[in-house]
Amino acid sequence: MIRTTLAATALLLAASPAFAQSQQEALDARYYRALAAGYKALMLCSAIAHAEANGTTRTPESVEAWELTGIQAPQAAVIADLPYTIVRRPTGQIAHVAVDWAEDMPARLAAYYGADTGCSVLPIGAPEDASNPDQPVPLAAQPPAPVRGKVIVEAGEGRSTRKRSAPQIPAVERVQKAALAGSYGEGSRTTAVLVSRPSPSGGRRSSAFYAPGFDDKTPQRTWSVAKSLAATLVGAAVQAGEANVADPIGLNYWRAGGASDPRGAITLDHALRMATGRFSDTPGNRTDALYFGGSTVDETAVNWPVLHPPGTVFRYANNDTLLAIKAIGQWLTFYPPQEFFAKLGMKHTVAETDIRGEYVLSSQVWSTAQDLARFGELYLNDGKLPSGERVLPEGWVQYVSTPSGPQPDGPFDYGAGFWLMNRSEGVPSDTFAAFGNRGQYVVIVPSRQVVIVRRGEDPVGARFDIAAFTRDVLAALPPE
C-alpha cells in the first residue's frame, strides 16, 4: 500500500508540470483570443466611425486589409477568423461593433460614444446590451479651420483637395512616390506621405500623396505618435499655469502611503522622459489589457512599483505617458483635448478614452496626415498659433527636443515625449519627431521649417526607414 501510494505520488509529481503547462497554455490561448476580438472590434469601430464623422468612408474590408493584417503575435493567428457584427443606430451612426470569440462568453464590444471621444473597448465579458443602439449620440460641431496664411496644396494620383496653383517640385514628388511604392523598407505599406514647407510666395505649401482608399479626410490610429500629442497637452497645461514639469506627480493614492512611498518622487519630467524607474510587465509598447482588453488607465498604468530611482533608467513604456496625462487630468476635465486640437485646426483628430473617460493618450488617437502636419507646424512656430496666441510655453520646443538623463539604446535619442534624430546622417541636428507603431511618423525640422508626415500600416518585421526618407526629402527641397 505504501509502495502504491509513493508510486502514485511520484507519477502525479512527474505529470504536474506538464498538466500545469497545458492548463496555462489553454488559459493564454483563451486570453489572446479575447484580446484579438477586442482589437478587431476597436479597429473596426474607430476606423469606420471616425471616417464617417469626417464625411468620408472606410469599409470593413478596407480595415481588414490594412489595420487588421500584419499585426502583432499572438493575435495575428486568430483575428481574421473572428466573426463580427456592426450595429448601427436608427440614424445610421455606428452604435458598436461586436466580435464573437467564445461560445460561453458575450461578444467583445467596442462602442462609439460620439465625435469628441470616439470608440472605447468594453471589458472582456461585458454584456451585449452595454451599448444602447437606440440612443442617438450627437456629432460634435466641427470648428472652422483657423486662417493659416496662403497654403498651396500639390497632390498626386488625382487626390488633391484643391487645384494645383503652383509648379510642382518633381524631386520631392519622386521621393514621396517612392515611399508610397515601398522603396524605404521591404514589406512596408505606406498610406500617406505629406511634406509641409515654406512657400516662396509666403505662407506654407504642402504636397500629399495617398494610397488607394485613403485621402486627406481618412483618419488612422496614431499609435505612439499620441505620446508626443500627450507631451504637447502637458505643455499647454504648463502654459496655463496648471502644471510644472519639475513637480512630483503626487497622485492621491500615492500620498496615502506618506513619505514611505517612493513613487512620490516621480515628476512629470520623469514621466515624459520615460524615466520613472517603475516596472512594467513588458518593455516597449505592449499594454494589451488596456488597449484591447477593456481595462482602464487606473487599473493598468499607475500602480506599478518602483525598481530604480526616478531619473536613472530609461524604459520606453506606455505607462509613463499615461501617468503624465493622469497628472494633468483635472485640467483636461475643463480643457479637453478636442478643444486644443480645434485651436490648431486639427478638426479630424480624436483622442479616445477608456470606458471610465480616461484618455488613452499613449496610443489611442485617430488623426489625418494633414492634421498631424498642423501639429508639427505648431512646433515650427515655437508653440504659437498663426494668430500669434501662445499655447505652449516659451522654450517648450527646446525642452521636448533636448535629451536629458538616461537614453535608449539604438540610433535615436529621446527628449520629453519626442524622439531625436540628431544622430541621423544627412539630417539637421535640430530634427525631432513623433514615432508610432506600424510606421507613423511626424518629423519636425526647425532649421528648414519643414514637417514630414508618413502614415502606414507596416506589418510586423517590416520597418520604414524614416531617417533615409527624411534625408532624401530635405535633399530634394530647394535650398533656402
Image: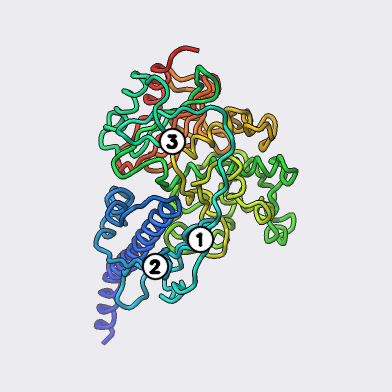
Residue 211's quadrant in the figure? Answer: top left
Res. 114 mark: 1
The location of residue 281, given as percent across then percent down, is 47, 54
Distance between the Cα atoms at labels 2 and 1?
13 Å
Vertical relation: 397 (above or below) 95: above
Q: Earlier in the sequence, mark 2 or mark 1?
A: 2
Q: Secondary structure at mark 2?
A: strand
Q: Residue at x 52, y 45 (%)?
A: 347
Mark 1 vs mark 3: in front:
1
Which residue is more in the foreground, 15 or 318? 318
- In the image, farthest residue toward the top: 479
Residue 357's quadrant in the figure? Answer: bottom right
Q: Amino acid at mark 2?
A: Arg
Which residue is more in the foreground, 439 or 49? 49
Tell me, yes or no, whether the two marked residues, 2 and 1, touch with CB atoms within 8 Å. Answer: no
Residue wearing tag 2 = 88
Distance between the Cα atoms at labels 1 and 3?
27 Å
Res. 441 mark: 3
**Left or right position of 119 against 398:** left
